[in-house]
């Protein structure tokens, strides 16, 4: 392997590996670090952001805590740090892929600074919510903002 494994890597159960690879690789920009097509599995990497995709197979050993119903991944969004969101947005637009939330510049308080990011939300073929985000930098928190929820 020519990359470093992330210390936390989500593994997403999916319904169609080819459809998911089209989305994750061709549109979002990940690369296949390695795969096991015979198992419906692929390990993806995008500059250190990593995710595993595994096609749902009732005959395989898969850990399910409840029924899988689309959209999958309810209650979670996966933030992916990217250098810029515009190339991803362009590929999604060319493919006619809808956004869940339009691009926005958002600032979040982190202690005594705010960190900014340009971000948007998009769902993969199984409904998993992705949030590609490019840094806008840091700035001081406006006076009176610290301690406010």
Image (cartoon, rainbow, N blue to C red):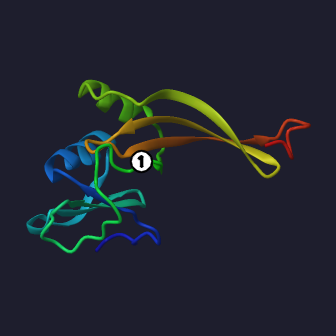
- Residue found farthest to the front: 66
Q: Residue 92 location, x and y as percent?
A: 31, 31
- Residue found farthest to the right: 144
Q: Residue 111 location, x and y as percent?
A: 79, 52
Q: Along the horizontal axis of the image, is 111 left or right of 36?
A: right
Q: Along the horizontal axis of the image, is 148 left or right of 71?
A: right
Location of the N terminus by quadrant is bottom left
Q: How many marks?
A: 1
Above or below, 134 relative to 50: above
Location of the C terminus by quadrant is top right
Above or below, 116 relative to 48: above
Above or below, 10 relative to 79: below
Q: Along the horizontal axis of the image, is 15 left or right of 147?
A: left
For mark 1, give the secondary structure: loop
What residue lies at 21% left-to-right and 75% top-to-bottom? 61
Say which quarter of the image contains residue 29. Answer: top left
Which residue is more in the foreground, 147 or 32?
A: 147
Which residue is more in the foreground, 29 or 40?
A: 40
What residue lies at 47% left-to-right and 72% top-to-bottom? 7
Say which quarter of the image contains residue 50. Answer: bottom left
Say which quarter of the image contains residue 108. Answer: top right
Which residue is more in the foreground, 91 or 56?
A: 56
- Residue found farthest to the left: 38
What residue lies at 40% left-to-right and 72% top-to-bottom? 4
What residue lies at 31% left-to-right and 66% top-to-bottom? 64
Query: Residue under circle 1?
Result: 74
Which residue is more in the foreground, 96 or 16?
A: 16
Q: Residue 75 location, x and y as percent?
A: 47, 48
Q: Along the horizontal axis of the image, is 46 left or right of 55?
A: right
Sort mark 1 into few (<14), some (14-19) or many (20+) by Cα contacts within 10 Å.
Answer: few
């Amino acid at each position: 392997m020519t990359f470093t494994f992330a210390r936390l890597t989500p593994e997403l159960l999916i319904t169609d590996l080819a459809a998911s690879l089209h989305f994750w690789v061709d549109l979002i920009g990940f690369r296949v670090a390695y795969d096991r097509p015979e198992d419906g599995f692929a390990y993806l990497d995008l500059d250190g952001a990593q995710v595993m995709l595994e096609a749902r197979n009732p005959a395989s050993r898969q850990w399910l805590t409840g029924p899988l119903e689309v959209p999958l991944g309810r209650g979670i969004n996966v933030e992916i740090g990217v250098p810029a969101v515009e190339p991803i947005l362009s590929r999604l637009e060319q493919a006619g892929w809808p956004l869940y939330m339009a691009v926005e510049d958002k600032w979040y308080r982190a202690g005594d600074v705010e960190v900014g990011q340009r971000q948007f939300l998009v769902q993969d073929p199984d409904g998993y919510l992705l949030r590609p985000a490019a840094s806008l930098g840091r700035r001081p928190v406006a006076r009176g903002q610290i301690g406010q929820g």
